[in-house]
Amino acid sequence: MRPLRFVALGDSLTEGVGDPVGNGWRGWAALLAAGLAPEPVRFTNLAVSGAQTRDVLESQLPAGLALRPDLVSVVVGVNDTLRRTFDIRAVAARLDTVYGAFAGQGAVLLTACLPDPGAVLGLPGALARPLARRQRAVNTVVHALSERHGAVHLHACDGAWIHDRAMWSADRLHPGERGHRQLALRCHALLARAGLATGAAPSPEPESPAPTRAARLWWLATAGTGWVARRRTDLLPQLLRLAADELRHDARGTSARLDLRAAHAASAALAALSVGEWTDAA
């Protein structure tokens, strides 16, 4: 019998950023792989830091299909929300294609919805709320498409872990080792209940100490400034416009309209997929 094949697709979260081991990253997917079966699992991590749904569709999907995995994780979308080109209809279409391709191959699909980056970073309300709407739209799409394609789905978009500093790395953008272990443990529990994980569950306890305050400040002074600079000409101008619009609606007492608009956009994106399939079938 050949070993179980597990392939992970996604961005820096799945790449393992925040959970350093040696000169590289480990992360939740690698921790999960170690507990999927008593015997060694053939694990391939195709996730790349900064990846958006387009990158997963165009680059990671072909490589993943070629490996013919038994289990495949697809966790992506946060980087889409951090771009001025954010388009929930395009996100939905790409994810539907990726999920469908692996499901069509007979692979078990593992997905997750995630917290919005504004909440994780602790941004002020007028800046955080537009990002929250975008991430809610992505999560709505992920929920619906996960059900449609029969995925094992981890609901990780809320809960106390988001505000627990011990779960996060120095950059506050990625889980630290403890956070990655929690994600791996929760995925393992879901797969075990479905009879798909038969190995020992990952330990929740980290092997390395949590980042110190000095480490967090060092990140802000070095890598953090680079991150801000890269977003200065991409996300920041639009985010400021969104924040201004947020404040105007807040002053008028019409903020609910923005929520309804975002919810409608997600629903329309999913409806467009259904219409497209009906047209193709006809």
Image (cartoon, grey):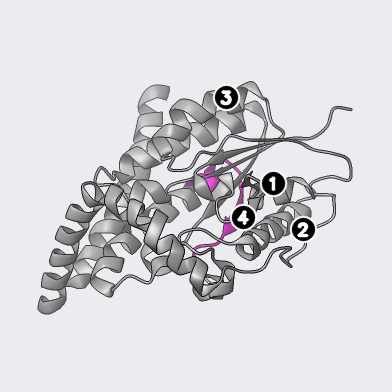
Report the residue at 14% width, 59% height from top: 241
Instruction: List the residue tagged with mark 4.
Output: 19
Type of the residue with mark 2: Pro
Residue 156 is inside the magenta segment: yes
Q: Position of residue 118 (x, y in %)?
A: 36, 65
Q: Residues within 10 Å of mark 1 (few under 14, many from 20)?
A: many
Report the residue at 62% width, 47% height from top: 25
How far apart, in angstroms, are the residues tagged by discs 1 and 3?
A: 18 Å
- Callout 1: SS: helix
Type of the residue with mark 1: Ala
- Callout 3: SS: helix
How far apart, in angstroms, are the residues tagged by discs 2 and 4?
A: 14 Å
Magenta highlight range: 145-158
As drawn, the label of residue 202 is: 2
Position of 243 relative to 93 (above/below): below
Report the residue at 57% width, 47% height from top: 14
Instruction: List the residue tagged with mark 3.
Output: 63
Q: Name the quadrant containing residue 73.
A: top right
Type of the residue with mark 3: Ala
Q: Position of residue 250 (x, y in %)?
A: 16, 76
Instruction: List the residue tagged with mark 1.
Output: 30
Q: Position of residue 254 (x, y in %)?
A: 15, 73
Q: Is residue 274 visible?
A: no
Position of 196 relative to 55 (above/below): below
Mark 2 / mark 4, whichever is N-terminal: 4
Q: Are marks 2 and 4 in contact (CB under 8 Å)?
A: no
Q: Residues within 10 Å of mark 2 (few under 14, many from 20)?
A: many
Q: Are marks 1 and 3 in contact (CB under 8 Å)?
A: no
How far apart, in angstroms, are the residues tagged by discs 4 and 3?
A: 24 Å
Front of the two marks 1 and 4 = 4
Report the residue at 46% width, 61% height from top: 171
